[in-house]
Amino acid sequence: MLDVFAVENYVMLALQLLLIGIKIFALVSCLSFSSESYVAAGKLTKATWGAILGIGVVLEIVPLPLLLIGLAFTIAALVYLADVRPALSGLRRR
């Protein structure tokens, strides 16, 4: 017999692992660019993005009932990946 709650638990676990992966990837990507790149791209500083993404990773790993705050940090990671990372990658060294 199919247990609906077990399926729901597996889906939630997969979603949580996906979000942890996205946030860790965004954090590692953030740390791989120089501070000058952020200034040249006209984005927030490296320290600011590092703090935002680092707190997001910690809140995703630590099981706290902060769903709305976790959602905000997920959106921040997605904004970094969709806007900031391409701008930083587009810069060329001369």
Image (cartoon, grey):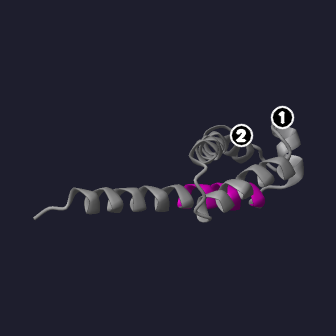
Q: Nearer the viewer, residue 58 or 91?
A: 58
Q: Nearer the viewer, residue 66 or 78?
A: 66
Where residue 72 sits: x, y (%)? 63, 41
* Residue at x-position 58% and y-position 53%: 65
- At numbered mark 2, what does the secondary structure look like: helix, strand or loop? helix
For the view shown, which residue lies furthest in the top direction?
A: 42
* Residue at x-position 81% and y-position 37%: 43
Q: Main secondary structure of the magenta part?
A: helix
Question: Where does the magenta region start and end?
Answer: 21-31
Q: Which residue is mark 1?
A: 42
Where residue 19 sits: x, y (%)? 52, 55
Compared with 92, 41 (above or below) is: above
Where residue 60 sits: x, y (%)? 60, 58
Q: Amino acid at mark 1?
A: Gly
Compared with 60, 36 (above or below) is: above
Q: Is any atom of residue 74 visible in this view?
A: yes
Position of 50 with respect to 68 (left or right) is right
**Residue 19 covered by magenta stretch:** no
Q: Is any atom of residue 94 visible in this view?
A: no
